[in-house]
Each structure stands twice: as C-alpha cells, then as structure tokens.
Amino acid sequence: MSLGLDLSYLERSARGEFDLGWLRDTDTEWGVRAVPSKTGLTMRDIFIGSYGEVPEHAPLRTMAPRGSDVAPDVPDMGYTINDKSEVWSDNVLDLYEEAVSRQWSATRDIPWGDLAPLDPDVEHAMCQLATVLSEVEMVAADFPAKWLWRINHDFVEAKMFLCTQVMDEARHTEVFRKRALANGGGLGKATAVVERFLQLILDADSYDEGSALMHLLGEGIVLSLFRAGAALAPSPVEQQIFRLCMQDEARHVAYGTMHLRYRLERDPSMAEDFHAYLDKGEEIMAMIFTTPEIVEPTAILAAGSVEAARDLGAAAGDVLRLQIVGDYLKRCDHAGLDRRGRLHLPDAIVQGVPGAMAGAAA
C-alpha cells in the first residue's frame, strides 16, 4: 500500500513554500461559534450548524470527524452500523455530559474504613449479592465494546456515550468485587442461569437485539436490584455503593429505552423483531426469580438473618418481583413497545403487576 510519500515537500516547506490547500480548498463552515452554557462547553453547545446535522445514513465509512472536509482517498474502515437509527437516542448528548461529570472512584469515594463486622448471615448474603452483581456488570461493558468499532464515526456522540458505559461497568465490577473481599466474607457462587443470560446478550446477532436484552431488560433488572440494595443496605458503606451505581445504571437504561423509542418511531415495522428479542430474554428473566443465589440473599438482607428471612421470605420476594416486572413494563411502554399482552413470563411471576396478567405465557 502506497501512502503517496512526497519527500520533496520537506524541502519546499523548509523554504517557506507551504501548500495551504487545507486552508483554501475547504467547504467547512467558517464562522460558526459555539457558546458555552452555564456548566461549560457541552456536546449540545457544539451541536450547531452543519456540525450538528447527523445523517440518517452515513455517506462514508471513515473516522473523519463529521462536518470536516474529507479527502477522496481516505480508507474505508468497514463500519457495519451506518444508519443513525441503529444506535441513536434523543438524550445521548445529555447522557454523555452527565456521565463524564459524575464519574466516581471505587477506591476513594466509598468509606471502606467504616465497614464494620456484620452478622455472618448478613455478610454471606451481601457477599453473594456482590458476587452476582460483579458477574453481571461486566457484560454491560463487554457488549458495547463488542459493537463500538462497528459503529460509523458520524454517530460519534453515541460511541462516546457507550465508552462511558464501558468505564461505568468496569467500576461496578470493581466495587462489588471489592465489597465481597473487604469484610471477611469472600466471593460466593456463580450460577448457570445468570451465565446463560449473559451469553444471550453477548451472542446477539445485532446491536438492536443486544441493546434490547441488555439496556431494557438486563440493566433494568440490575437497576431495580440497586434500588432494593440501597434500601436494604446493612451499613452506610453498602448504601453509598448502591446509590453511586444506581445513578450510573439509570443513564444506561435511559439510553436503551430512548434508543428503542427512536428506532421504532422511524421504523414501526421493527416492533415484532424487538418483541421476539424480549420473548427470549423474558424466559431467562423468569428463571432469575427462582434462583436461590439471587432471591435468598435479598430476603436475608431485608430480614436481617436467615431465620427471620424464612418468615419474611414470600413478602420480600414479592416486593422485588413487583418492582422488577412493573419497572420493566413501564420502560417498554415509554419506548413504545407494549409487552403487557404478550409477556413470556409465568402467571406466578406477573401476579399482582397491574395489567400484566392478560396474555402472560404459561
């Protein structure tokens, strides 16, 4: 491959004979000035003029910044996601800014020194839950990383947001692994049920499928677990962990929900595809509610001991089940995908969830 090396340019430029083609032969928009907002110069502040015009279909497959003049001989990068609707959401610019402004450290921002000995039942429950969360959080980094290099650079804001998600999820895996090892309990048990769900996300044939399974379903479940964890935290240390993780996870779910909405608004015929994706995901979701390694630690944290959890068991499980399924249906509604009449969840799982019984799969 010849790069067109012109060694004579070294001599000409040394004599002050500049080419200046980059200066004179340009179609870029001169005079467009981005004005900083109160918080600084945001991505939305520079989303102006022709630079803020994101093509519905990317005309080239290069890494050239959108709005720049592109030389005719730039190489093709082989991007496979070249339609805006495949990755875009109307909130992605704001979510990126929030993500970079709210980064936190699992080393410095958790008061690890305040972690006191807990009742052994509670410590074991906390460590088991931390094990599961450490396990599932990394898939939410692996999935976007798998697809990032396939996304056209014209949709750079979406790529930048997904990069923040990778960092967020690495930090979540870090903080829960640290919690499992910080108080004498250690890591618990990994289960085949959880691993099958993670495999389903990673093996998705398209970004649409993986995003629906991960952002809408998987991360939505985890967000509900974080909310429950913040309420049931045995000490201020765990409460801080869950609160910080929750603010990150809420961004990821917000992106996935609005991405699905954006996708369906531009191509309503894709609704059946997304229904099919979620049909598969819900089958795994149902198994989660019958997995002791997830259900029982939550009940023990709520009750304070194994014995108390046996008495509280059903009530604690119902609260979490209703929240997870109810929140999931609300996200689907907000995205424009009505799942209430075609849930692939057993009646025992959807019982008590408003409007969810009709059409539920046996």
Image (cartoon, rainbow, N blue to C red):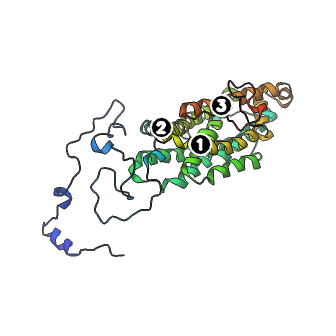
> Which residue ends up furthest to the front in the rendered image?
269
**How many numbered discs sit on the rendered protein?**
3
Residue toward you, 189 or 104: 189
Amino acid type, label 2 = Glu
Amino acid type, label 3 = Arg
Residue beneath disc 3: 340
| Residue 272 numbered mark, or none | 1
Q: Give the spatial CA distance, label 2 vs label 3.
A: 19 Å
Q: Quadrant of the C terminus?
A: top right
| Residue 265 numbered mark, or none | 2
N-terminal-most mark, 3 or 1: 1
Amino acid type, label 1 = Glu
Seen in the picture, residue 352 relative to 219 is either above or below; the reply is above
Q: Is residue 139 visible?
A: yes
Marks 3,1: beta carbons within 8 A: no
Q: Secondary structure at mark 1?
A: helix
